[in-house]
């Protein structure tokens, strides 16, 4: 994939700076697009990025160098199954096992000529009129402006927007009584630093709805050449009755069409709006790469494989939803 944001040198360097140190990270010549964390057990390696990436991309770049993977187990988390990945090694001893996990959601606009055509394909005439009314109502009530920062933003303006984003997010998650690890000061410091640099390279973007120059809705995104990855969205809850979330989605889709962006990826996590708006569900996968000629490595790999399969089985089991409903009632 061209210019995948999470595979960029900037993302890698900033992540290492904030969460580990260079000696703990290794690159394999045979696998491009990912760096890996060393563990205490030198035979196991996990991709870097932890929970700061929506998903991961990689490919087998130099399959003849597969000797470097002798007696090793490599685990790459969160690979969308719609990515076209070259993951074949010339060495038959190096195996790749894929384990299904969460469902993801995206809007695929290939073959769609306009935003209007896409909305028409998803909604009834009555609903389309209602959606248009959201925009008319908020614009008639307030002094609304929309802006997508992509390729250029001043540091002063960026810092101001990110402060609004942080403050609105804290309020939102406190109301929901949910802890968001990305808002932990150390974690948010990383996001602030990396996003600014990636915006300059057109590998990230920020969409803002302003009312009289005050941000009332903010979306943080990462970008490849053909995909917009929606990372985080927040809006001022005092504007809830104006359907700010829907308006932000529409305006970002409008921007995608204007820039030739073919996919708007909402990533994992079910929310009703995703099912309503997205036309392409997909699955994330864990990819486990290992040397099958080593008995100990094979044992290690399959221990992880069966553990991940068990987690997914429990995740999909009807009992899980039943227990969640009981917890909500209490």
Image (cartoon, helix red, strand yellow):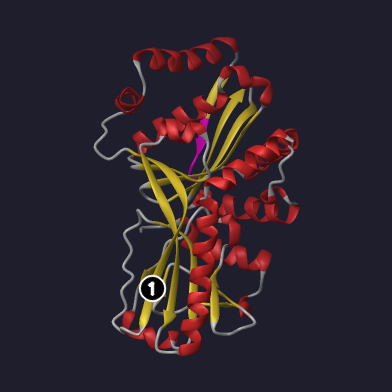
Secondary structure that dominates the magenta span: strand
| Range of residues picked out in magenta | 147-151
Query: Residue at the spot x=55%, y=21% of the render?
Result: 243
On the picture, is 141 further left or further right than 260?
Answer: right
Residue 3 in the image, given as x and y percentages of width and height = 40, 57
State whether residue 35 appears in this view.
Answer: no
Which of the 4 quarters of the picture holds residue 178? Answer: top right
Asked whether 148 falls inside the magenta stretch, the response is yes
Quarter of the image that includes the C terminus: top right
Q: How many marks?
A: 1
Residue 293 coordinates in the image, percent (x, y): 40, 89
Using the image as rendered, state which of residue 74 and residue 166 is in the foreground.
Answer: 74
Residue 174 is left or right of residue 292, and the answer is right
Q: Check the image and report above or below for 262 versus 98.
A: above
Residue 19, compared with residue 222, is above or below; it is below
Of residues 176 and 166, the one drawn nearer to the viewer in this rendering? 176
Whether residue 317 is in magenta: the answer is no
Is residue 233 at all visible to an observer of this figure? yes
- Which residue is nearer to you in this view: 293 or 117? 293
Q: Which residue is mark 1?
A: 96
Secondary structure under badge 1? strand
Residue at the extreme left of the image, as rendered: 111
Specify the quadrant of the image occupied by residue 162.
Answer: top right
Rendered location of residue 7, percent (x, y): 47, 62
Crowd rating for badge 1 (residues with CA inside 10 Å; few <14, some 14–19, many 20+): many
Q: Position of residue 25 (x, y in %)?
A: 58, 76
């Amino acid at each position: 994939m061209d210019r995948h944001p999470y595979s960029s040198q900037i993302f890698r360097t900033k992540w290492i700076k904030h969460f580990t140190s260079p000696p703990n990270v290794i690159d394999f010549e045979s696998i491009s697009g990912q760096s890996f964390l060393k563990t205490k057990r030198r035979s196991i390696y996990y991709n870097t990025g932890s929970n700061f990436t929506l998903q991961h991309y990689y490919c087998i770049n130099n399959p003849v160098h597969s000797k470097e993977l002798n007696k090793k187990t490599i685990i790459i988390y969160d690979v969308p199954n719609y990515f076209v990945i070259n993951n074949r090694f010339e060495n038959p001893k190096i195996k790749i096992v894929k384990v299904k996990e969460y469902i993801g959601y995206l809007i695929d606009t290939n073959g769609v000529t306009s935003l209007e055509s896409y909305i028409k394909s998803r909604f009834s005439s009555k609903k389309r009129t209602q959606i248009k009314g959201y925009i008319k109502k908020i614009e008639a009530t307030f002094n609304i402006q929309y802006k997508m920062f992509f390729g250029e933003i001043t540091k002063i303006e960026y810092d101001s927007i990110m402060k609004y984003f942080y403050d609105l997010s804290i309020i939102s998650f406190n109301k929901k009584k949910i802890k968001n690890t990305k808002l932990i000061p150390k974690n948010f410091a990383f996001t602030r630093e990396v996003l600014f640099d990636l915006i300059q390279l057109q590998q990230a973007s920020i969409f803002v709805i302003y009312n009289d120059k005050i941000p009332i809705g903010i979306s943080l995104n990462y970008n490849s050449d053909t995909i917009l990855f929606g990372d985080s969205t927040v809006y001022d809850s005092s504007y809830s009755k104006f359907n700010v979330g829907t308006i932000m989605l529409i305006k970002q889709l409008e921007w995608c069409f204007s820039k030739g962006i073919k996919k708007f990826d909402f990533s994992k996590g079910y929310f009703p709006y995703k099912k309503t708006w997205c036309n392409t569900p997909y699955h994330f996968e864990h990819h486990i790469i290992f040397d099958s000629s080593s008995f100990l490595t094979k044992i290690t790999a399959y221990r992880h494989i069966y553990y991940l399969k068990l987690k997914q089985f429990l995740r999909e089991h009807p009992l899980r939803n039943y227990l969640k409903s009981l917890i909500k009632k209490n």
